[in-house]
Image (spheres, grey):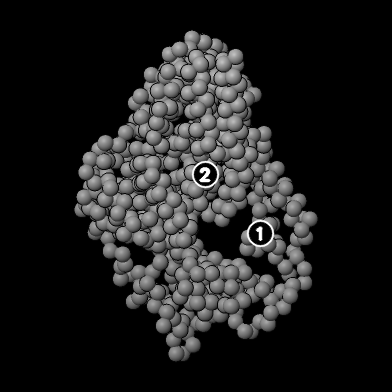
Amino acid sequence: MNSMVTSSTVRDLLDRADAARAAGRGDSAASLYDEAATRSRAADDLPGWTEAVLGAAGVQLFGAEPGKLPAQLYDVLVRTTDDSTRARLAAALTRCWVYAGEAGRAGQFATEAVACAERTGAPELIADCLDAALAAHWGPDDLAVRRSLTQRLDDVAAHVLDPDARLQAHLWGLQVACESLDLQAIYRQLRALERLGEESARARFFAASRRLMLDLLQGRTGTTSRLTAIATEAADQAGLADAWLVLAAMTAYAAAQAGDIETCTAGAETAEALARSEGITVLCAEAAFLWARTGDQNRTRALVHTFHGSTLDDLPRDVNWLLTLQCVLEAALAVSDRDLVGRAAQLLTPYQDRAVFNAGAVMFHGVTDDTLARAAAVLGDPATAGRLRARALATYERLGAGWWRDRLAAWPLADEPVAQDNDRVQFRPTTDGLWLIGRDGAATPLRELRGFGYLSQLLRRPRHPIGALDLVGAEAAVESGLGEILDQQALQAYRQRLRDLDHELAEADDWSDLERQAAVRLERQALLDELARATGLHGRPRTTGSSQERARVAVKKAITAAIDRIAGSDEPLAHHLRTTIHTGLTCTYDPGPAESPHWILD
């Protein structure tokens, strides 16, 4: 009778724990699983005990102290003889040690998990155990092993219907593609995740969060709200206990790149609080980086100081090693901590020309050549700094990583002044109705054009959007439009066709169908050109006949004519203006940090 009561109590605890886990209440679930494990162990109820410890492992927080969980898992493992159950327990124990920052202890259990799974012949179980083995080989020196294991996982998952097995394969495929900076493979894996997200909320969460990673890598911050909302909803539906960490990273790093100081500060506060409460070293490093992005030197310096002494030398060479060093070096450079710059750079130097990603390709953190170049400049080695910076800039250019490229380009080498005399450019009206335009000392007087005045207004306020109607001024009264160039139904049809073409292009890429790729891209570009003509800022329909539209057209024509006039006497300056002046309903002069000359405008 007592045994039956105990069994009923354990079942009740497990059901409540499962419900808490599904609701995303990881702490509550962990407590209930622990109580169920204690009661099952006392009653020698091995099945209940197994379910309880596996459940507890499923809600373990990445990077947190695991407590007694490794001992609980091992206690059950040594009492189990069934290969299927042993595989699941060994895989859970592998992840437990990896999550705890003790990857060195995980290897033997990863090997056993794969061996047991392969004896069962169950593809889903083999895939799960290969996933655990990959987690155990996630250090900076294991990339070749990850490539091999990822290929094995992909081969297994290709023949199973289970969405979780396929999800694991695509996530590791994306991770390796990111580490290798293989853009085409990144695109393929993201498309595969998005397709899988149509049948799995869990996959949808990963697809949205990793899509934002790529968007931010390539400088697109405008998708943050939409992708974060999708990821949040999917995480709630899937009951992902630690999804909030990924969501916090999505928000904080997007803000850091967009220059949103308030949101970035909130992200830094959250990361620092968790780092201190849980003792998570990598979060401390990330918090330091985020504080550096806010410009708060005091908070940055306080965290940087925690990495003095032997802290960096004692870091485990696991999934977080490259990320921790990259963030520490970034923060040390921001506060000019020369000693820490030197130590971090020394440890990172053997890993030149490597991409740095948060665990699971959550967020891109640049390439090591970037931070090492700036460190070399600070440490007085301009030759090394120049070589590394050139290679990093080339990498960023290939990836389309404009934000990272521009930031690095703005960092001067020790023998490279920020501004040269020939960077002074005259762009000013004279008293006799002419404009003096060109490099200082070689400027050419040009007959006045209306576009010169528009350009002058934009050059005075770089990176600040100015309405075309404001540039034109009071000469145009504000009038309503006569109608949209494309009506809403047509716009929706165009956008649906673009979505269909994206799907067709992904399929063509997967099959390496070059002829189909070319045809789809041609049609897609034609549609994009038409949409660009018919829509304005944020995709709003553009109207004909309105004063805003007439101002847009007038300003564009005037600026184009002005730049063409300048090209006759100074083609390099005209090229600079063509690539940095953006016209539309709002107009902007948007040079990179290292591109802007010193303008003489008066």
- Please state, as top left, top right, bottom left or bottom right, where the C terminus lies in the image: bottom left
Q: Is residue 54 above or below residue 22?
A: above
The residue lying at 45 percent from left, 16 percent from top is: 77
Q: Residue 495 placed where, x, y %?
A: 71, 51
Residue positioned 33% across, 55% down in the render: 300
CB-based contact (under 8 Å), mark 1 and mark 2: no
Measuring 57% from the left and 48% from the top, which residue is drawn there? 228
Q: Residue at x 55, y 39 (%)?
A: 25
Q: Secondary structure at mark 2?
A: helix
In this view, 290 is above or below 147:
below
Other residues around mark 1 within 10 Å, as few (<14) / some (14–19) / many (≥20) = few
Q: Amino acid at mark 1?
A: Gly
Q: Which residue is mark 2?
A: 244
State the residue position of label 1.
539
Find residue 279 and report its horizontal and vertical position in percent: 35, 41
Q: Is residue 139 left or right of residue 417?
A: right
Task: Tell me where residue 281 sits by quadrant.
Answer: top left
Looking at the image, residue 219 sits to the left or right of residue 522; the answer is: left
Q: Quadrant of residue 417?
A: bottom left
Q: Earlier in the sequence, mark 1 or mark 2?
A: 2
Q: Is residue 88 visible?
A: no
